[in-house]
Amino acid sequence: MAFEIPESVKVWSQFGHPAMMWVLFGLCIYAMYLGFQIRRTRNAEAEVRKELVKKKFNFKHHQIGSVLLAFMVLGTLGGMAVTYINNGKLFFGPHLLVGLGMTGIIAVSSAMVPYMQRGNEAARITHIGLNTALVGLFGWQAISGMDIVTKIIGRL
């Protein structure tokens, strides 16, 4: 006996991925802000640095980054699963490919953290570069994703 997903669940499940990704896009921008504050703290004069350290930008950035890594991977897989459940196939196109690329980028960026903690400047520059690209790609994904949502709504 095959498990049958109710039609109402299939329909509404299609909006979970876009909603989650918009939240993650906002968190991504916040994480970037925190990263810039860490850089600012690292380069500040001694007295200013003492005040900036109290704001715990490093800790907040690390926490948000961990949430982003976990939920971006889960969101990517979830979006693919819902697409397959509702259509019987994945749509091989730019939105899927860029999303998979972003998942790889955030994984590599996160892998730089242990090296950055040991003071490796090349890892830090790689982390910053990858995350800057990630935010740019995320912006594009938000636009292309809304085109997909519009098509879904048109079919309802």
Image: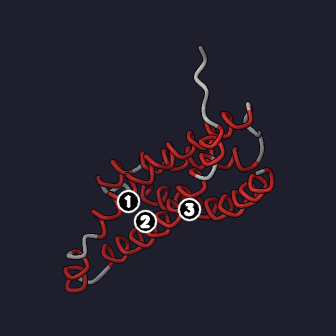
Q: Disc 3 marks which residue?
A: 22
- Residue at x 63%, y 43% (from the top left corner): 8
| Nearest the eye: 105 or 88 | 88
Q: Sequence order check: which comes first, mark 3 or mark 2? A: 3
Please give the residue where the numbered disc 1 appears in the rendered image: 64
Q: Position of residue 112 (x, y in %)?
A: 41, 49
Mark 3 Cα within 10 Å, few/some/many (few <14, many 20+)? some
Q: Give the crowd class for mark 2: few <14, some 14-19, many >=20 residues within 10 Å.
A: many
Looking at the image, which residue is at 56% across and 58% down? 19
Name the residue rendered at 64%, 65% in the picture.
Answer: 139
Q: Image quarter for residue 40?
A: bottom left
93 shown above or below 18: above
Secondary element under disc 3, as helix, strand or loop, is helix
In the rendered structure, the answer to whether residue 95 lies left or right of residue 69 reads: right
Element under disc 1: helix
- Give me the C-alpha separation between circle 1 and circle 3: 15 Å
- Residue 31 numbered tag: 2
- Is label 1 in contact with label 2 (beta carbons under 8 Å)? yes
Image position, residue 28 (x, y; %): 49, 63
